[in-house]
Amino acid sequence: MSLSSQDIERIAHLARIRVTPADVLDVQAKLEGIFKLIDEMQAVNTQGIEPMSHGLDMVLRLRDDAVTETNHREKYQKNAPQTAEGYFLVPKVIE
Amino acid sequence: MSWNTFSTVAETVKALDDKKVSAVELATHYLDRADALQPILNAYVTLDREKTLTEAKVADDNRAAGVAAPLLGVPIAHKDIYLIDGWRTTCGSRMLENFVAPYSSTVVRNMSAAGMVTLGKLNMDEFAMGSSNETSYFGTVKNPWDTSRVPGGSSGGSAASVAAGLTPASTGTDTGGSIRQPAMFCNLTGLKPTYGICSRFGIIAFASSLDQAGPFAQTAEDCALLLSAMAGFDTNDATSLDRPKENYSLDLAKRLTGLRIGLPKEFFGEGVAPGIAKAVDEALAVYRKLGATTVEVSLPNVKYSVPAYYVVAPAEASSNLSRFDGVRYGHRAAEYTDLMDMYKRSRAEGFGAEVKRRILIGTYVLSHGYYDAYYLQAGKLRRLIADDFKRAYEVCDVVMGPTAPETAFQFGSKSDDPVKMYLNDIFTICANLTGQPAMSLPCGVDENGLHVGMQIIGNYLDEARMLNVAHQFQLATDWHTCHPSI
């Protein structure tokens, strides 16, 4: 498969990563090489095969609907770039 | 028993028991060595002498008070992917350059409960994405055997630190070979356990269905001690296996008479460096002498491991790494125009090139219209590969082969070509896709004196047997006792 520079820009937007016009060609070339490797798996006929996500085919547990955690807001917010009165601050999104 | 820099974990426990050395003396010795070798090896990202010596003092006090803990006072260094309350935890990334963990991972808590003293946080490929430690924001780790060569990755600091005698043991994580390949490159024993026996809680997630924690040490005997401390059911990890705690040292002494070793023809073909093939053949001869038999098996779908992995791992990474948005923690760009621009610039600046590539691949394969062709197809291939192994275990007890197709390579020799780098993990990735336990142990050197690793892939939950198989080999050989002159 081949990727256009528009494809790269679309994916980068979905991934919320700024890719400068100067980077697009290099990213495009490297991704094409990687997809050439990935596309080898399309040769396998997997019709009727059940996909696997866990080797021991375990089922997810349920837990009791009970509070287990205490409030660590202040400690956790110490790592935040910008906070005020217990809130995380972001650039203005509502006019 | 006397004690020295290269004493094993088992020997260190004995020396502590016999009062030949104290936890504070051990911690001081290894911290001094770490400081002295940091400019050469760059194995650590963070050291905190005060924290470490406080822990060591507590261990000595506990010992004096008669507190029983299996590894009380033994030093351990952790890959910088494990959260430790109050320690900076970077995951090798600019994104988390100033992140201080607000709680500890379960594995670290388990090891602390066993009495181990934390020496520091070890360098690694950024977000564990790499096979050479060249993607770390904090600089490359050098291989202590030859500083012009890579230590392997992604747990490069974990391997270099044990090999250079900066710590008797370390933790790593293995998503596609990140414990086993550096273990081979640095002449160590490293184990990736069955998916689900070590909790992933508090380990920064890369690919959640593949990530597993495991130990690095000089010997299989040490790995058994370490795994016994690390593993255990944890309600905080939804994929943790609910099973009783296991003592992985119990079977170490068993004879290997009658052991059936499966040799996949796919692991011994072209593409394996001749020096590696020779060392592995010689190791197999040792096993036959120890009473094992070998049988050829076939894993016809294993050749699709690398393509399937480069769908599954980036897909899960793109989802996991979406949490780094410059809002709650991590890097935020200094200048931006609006919220969207803030996200895009923060992530562009905070992540390195390889991490961004993988996020882009993952985003693409999960994007509208591509899910069936990529993620679903890769999931089906995982099943086919697991079925191949299931058939193999009908005629053998363990599978063996080389850990990697080539020995430790020079810095820069693959860093411009991601595909070339990815193919270095060709033998290790399958055990992550299937969730089986796998380990690497030292088994010789190639024509350049570079170390070769033998990979043992076991059936699910068969760690005790694998460690027995590795330990018996180490009783008969001395490759694991070689140390670099550094």
Image: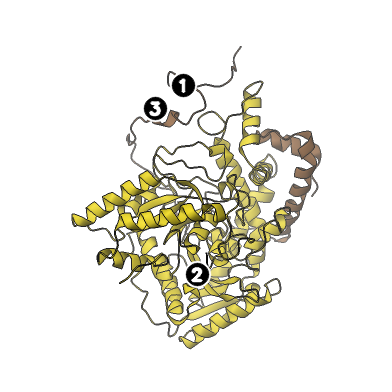
Residue at the left extreme? B65
Decide which of B196, B332 is in the foreground and name it: B332
Instruction: Name which quarter of the figure residue B423 lies in.
Output: bottom right
Drawn colour of chain B? yellow
Q: Which residue is mark 3?
A: A74
Share a chain, discs 2 and 1? no
Q: Position of residue B127 (x, y in %)?
A: 56, 46
Q: Specify the amino acid type for callout 3.
A: Glu
- The chain containing the residue under callout 1 comes to A
Residue A87: image tag: 1
Q: Nearer the viewer, mark 2 or mark 1?
A: 2
Instruction: Say whether marks 3 and 1 touch (CB < 8 Å).
Output: no
Above/below status of B337 relative to B36: above
Instruction: Name which quarter of the figure residue B466 lies in.
Output: bottom left
Q: Position of residue B140 (x, y in %)?
A: 60, 52
Q: Which residue is mark 2?
A: B483
Looking at the rendered structure, the secondary structure element under dot 2 is loop
